[in-house]
């Protein structure tokens, strides 16, 4: 399948039917993410057993790319421990931001996110959920892709 078709099909599918949508209550860790450039907002909540993510939900309002990316992420990280999630985060970050990075087949459906590279203004839409997950695993709080006036916000690149 062409990567372009994969991108379109996967993004459409996960936007229409987001997996793991909602909020865990109680949760062991939560964080909010905001991308002011597009208006995407999401909350990621986690259940952790030791270092392992045993459950994850996300909710919020965002564009198709941010919703689909969060849905894909939730499927990919469930059952993984912090180390594996960190590795995957670095992998996805490279996939989204390095135009010449090869697309690794082992990423499965996540490889579809590489289609975002053709739309640089949407990279933050796709990476928002990953930064939010990192924040939840770190200490919770609120992250913003643009910094600004949100309390305890962290500027992302
Ligand atoms: Zn967006």
Image: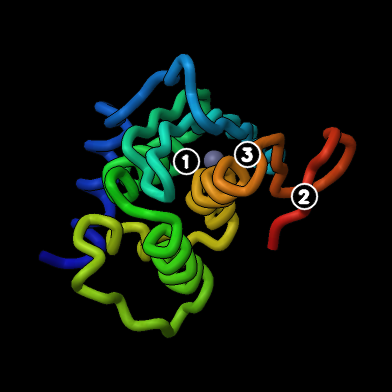
Q: Mark 2 or mark 3: which comes first in sequence?
A: 3
Q: Mark 2 or mark 1: which comes first in sequence?
A: 1
Q: Vertically, is 114 above or below 34?
A: below
Label 2 CB sits under 8 Å from any ligand 1 atom: no
Q: Residues within 10 Å of mark 1 (few under 14, many from 20)?
A: many
Residue named by callout 3: 38
Label 1 CB sits under 8 Å from any ligand 1 atom: yes
Q: Ligand 1: which quarter?
A: top right
Q: Secondary structure at mark 1?
A: helix
Residue sitting at 51 percent across and 24 percent down?
A: 60
Label 3 CB sits under 8 Å from any ligand 1 atom: yes
Residue named by callout 2: 154
* Residue at the extreme top: 25
Q: Is residue 43 visible?
A: yes
Residue named by callout 1: 66
Measure the alpha-carbon separation of dots 2 and 1.
19 Å
Q: Which of the numbered marks, if any, corresponds to residue 4?
A: none
Q: Secondary structure at mark 2?
A: loop
């Amino acid at each position: 399948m062409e990567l372009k078709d994969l991108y379109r099909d996967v993004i459409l599918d996960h936007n229409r039917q987001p997996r793991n949508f909602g909020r865990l209550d109680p949760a062991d860790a939560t964080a909010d993410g905001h991308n002011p450039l597009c208006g995407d907002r999401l909350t990621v909540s986690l259940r952790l057993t030791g270092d392992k993510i045993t459950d994850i939900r996300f909710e919020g309002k965002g564009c198709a790319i941010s919703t689909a990316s969060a849905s894909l992420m939730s499927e990919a990280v469930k059952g993984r421990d912090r180390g594996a999630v960190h590795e995957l985060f670095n992998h996805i970050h490279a996939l989204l931001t390095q135009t010449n990075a090869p697309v690794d087949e082992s990423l499965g459906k996540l490889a579809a996110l590489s289609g975002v590279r053709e739309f640089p203004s949407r990279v933050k839409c796709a990476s928002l959920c990953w930064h939010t997950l990192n924040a939840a695993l770190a200490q919770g709080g609120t992250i913003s892709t643009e910094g600004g006036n949100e309390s305890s916000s962290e500027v992302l690149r």
